Amino acid sequence: MSKPAVIVRPRRAPPVLVCRKCLKRCGDGRAIRRALKAELKARDADAAGGGQGRKLKPPKLVLTGCFGVCPKRAATLASGATLSRGEFVLVRDESEVGAAVDVLVPLKPQASS
C-alpha cells in the first residue's frame, strides 16, 4: 500500500496573476502594477485567511504570459477564484484597482456545493 499524499497549506494567500503583455501595452501599466502591489499589501492578512485563526501573508503579484483575452488599453488580471469561475478582470487605470482586488481576493472562502 502506498503512502498518502502530503497536504500542505501555504502561509500566503493565493497569487494574483497579471498578463505581462497587457501591462506593457496599457498606457498606465506601471501605475496599475504599483497600485496593485500596494492594494494587495494593504489588505488585512487576517481577512484573507477567512477568519480561520491563522494569519496569511498578502498575495503575491505574478506576471504571466498571455491569457488570450487581449483587451485594448486595459490589463487582464486573474486569480484562482476567478479562474475557477472562468472569469477575468480588466483594469483600465489605477483607480479601478481597489474594486478589482475585491473580486480577485475574496474575503471569505466560498462554500463549495
Image (tube, helix red, strand yellow):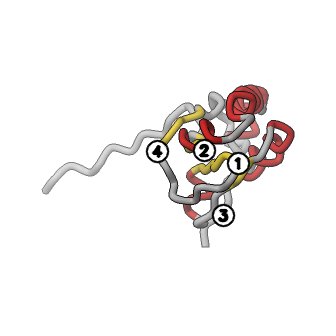
Q: Are marks 1 and 3 in contact (CB under 8 Å)?
A: no
Of badges 4 and 3, nearer the viewer stands 4
For the point 58% across and 32% down, the residue is: 60
Residue 1 picture location, percent across and down:
13, 56
Of badges 4 and 2, nearer the viewer stands 2
Mark 2 vs mark 1, CA separation in Å: 7 Å
Numbered circle sitting on residue 65: 4
For the point 62% across and 34% down, the residue is: 59
Residue 84 against residue 6 in the figure, above or below: below
Mark 4 vs mark 3, CA separation in Å: 30 Å
Question: What amino acid is labelled 2 in the image?
Answer: Cys
Numbered circle sitting on residue 22: 2
For the point 75% across and 29% down, the residue is: 31
- Front one among 6 and 61: 61
Which residue is tagged 3?
111
Q: Residues within 10 Å of mark 2 (few under 14, many from 20)?
A: many
Q: Residues within 10 Å of mark 1 (few under 14, many from 20)?
A: many
Relative to residue 3, is residue 15 drawn left or right?
Answer: right
Residue 110 against residue 94 in the figure, above or below: below
Residue 92 picture location, percent across and down:
77, 46
Question: What amino acid is labelled 3 in the image?
Answer: Ala
